[in-house]
Amino acid sequence: MSTPKKVTLLSWLLGALFVAGAAITPAHAQATRTWVSGVGDDANPCSRTAPCKTWAGAIAKTLTGGEIDALDPGGFGALTITKSITLDGGGGIVASALVQGTPGMTIAAPGSVVILRNIRFNGLINSGTAGTTGVNISNAARVVIEKCDVFGFGSTGILVAPSTASTTTFVKIQDTNVNNNAGGISIKPTGGNAVQAQIRHTSADNNVNGGIRVDGTGGGPSMVSIADSSSSLNGADGLNVLSGSSGNVAVDVQRTVFGENAAIGVSASNSNGGTVTITVGDSILSYNAGNAWAIVGSATLLSFKNNQVTGPTGSAPGTATFQ
């Protein structure tokens, strides 16, 4: 008579554990798509009907490679991204990251693919404690930034500075405004990391320390193409390209405006070693206070097709070729 009781008790215990486990598992599950809302709560599961409050709250509940979408207007906070993810602020609403004293978003995700879309990054530069960098790319395989606004940061709007040796980081910046920061877009790989970047339909205007800077002095090479864009009204150069001893740089530019910058429209320098090659075509260089072109050392600058140059042109030493 004792054996059936033991079996019955064991069965009951196993059943209780199964039910408890079934109840616990969903709480740890990650969804492929999660949601944030201005009236959300990070204690929620981040579903459409029970959204989270912040990007940081939602990313912990989102599967690697998944997507976080904004349901309605809101400031969803700063974020460090360590895995493949898509963040979409949605069209027609204000989905933002307002920060003071920190980056808006840091991408530190080795081997990952990160997409940022329809987001406003506000560094609150007039608050007295500005955010440092809007988007800081320190490690990733591929990053796409599209239809974003990055403004008010005390260091740089978008910083592309990966550091993994013998790795190439691919970056695409499209339909994006990087305006009113201390610096606009800066590309400076280090430690032997290479960068291949495309900048399309993007403005880098009215930044204090220049619009677009491609810098090989950190030891990594870069290949960059810029088209249908603007780098104007900046407090320094519109486009500043410089190489380092092991960081060769090549930049192709087409249909882009470099206008009324306080320094040079397009500047090329290999004074730190390495090689610089810039091609500029079908573009406008107008009324740049420090001249349209500047070449330092033996950097190569090729002007082709129908560039329009007004205002001071500057001298063209080195290997400049104008066609």
Image (tube, rainbow, N blue to C red):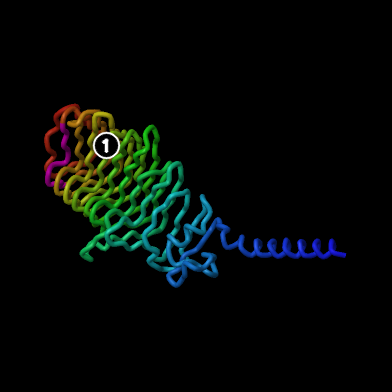
- Tell me where residue 291 appears, x and y as whole percent: 13, 42
Q: Is residue 305 visible?
A: no
Q: Is residue 282 left or right of residue 117?
A: left
Amino acid on which disc 1 is placed:
Gly
| Location of mark 1 (residue) | 218
Magenta span contains residue 292: yes
Determine whether, in the image, residue 33 is placed left or right of residue 95: right
Residue 1 magenta: no
| Residue 103: image location, x then y, percent | 31, 55
Quadrant holding the C terminus: top left
- Name the residue at the front extreme: 2
- The secondary structure that dominates the magenta segment is loop
Horizontal relation, residue 214 to residue 142: left or right: left
Q: Position of residue 279 (x, y in %)?
A: 27, 34
Q: Quadrant of residue 9?
A: bottom right
Looking at the image, the residue that sits furthest to the right is: 1
Asked whether 243 or 312 is in front, the reply is 243
Residue 138 visible to an observer of this rendering = yes
Image quarter hosting the N terminus: bottom right
**Crowdedness of circle 1 by 10 Å Cα count: few (<14), some, many (20+)?**
many
**Element type at mark 1:** loop
Q: Quadrant of residue 253?
A: top left
Give residue 34's position: percent from left, percent from top. 52, 61
Q: Is residue 285 above or below residue 32?
A: above
- The magenta region covers 287-296
Residue in view at x 41 percent, y 68 percent = 73
User: Against 231, is 97 above or below?
Assistant: below
Would you place residue 44 above or below residue 114 in this image? below
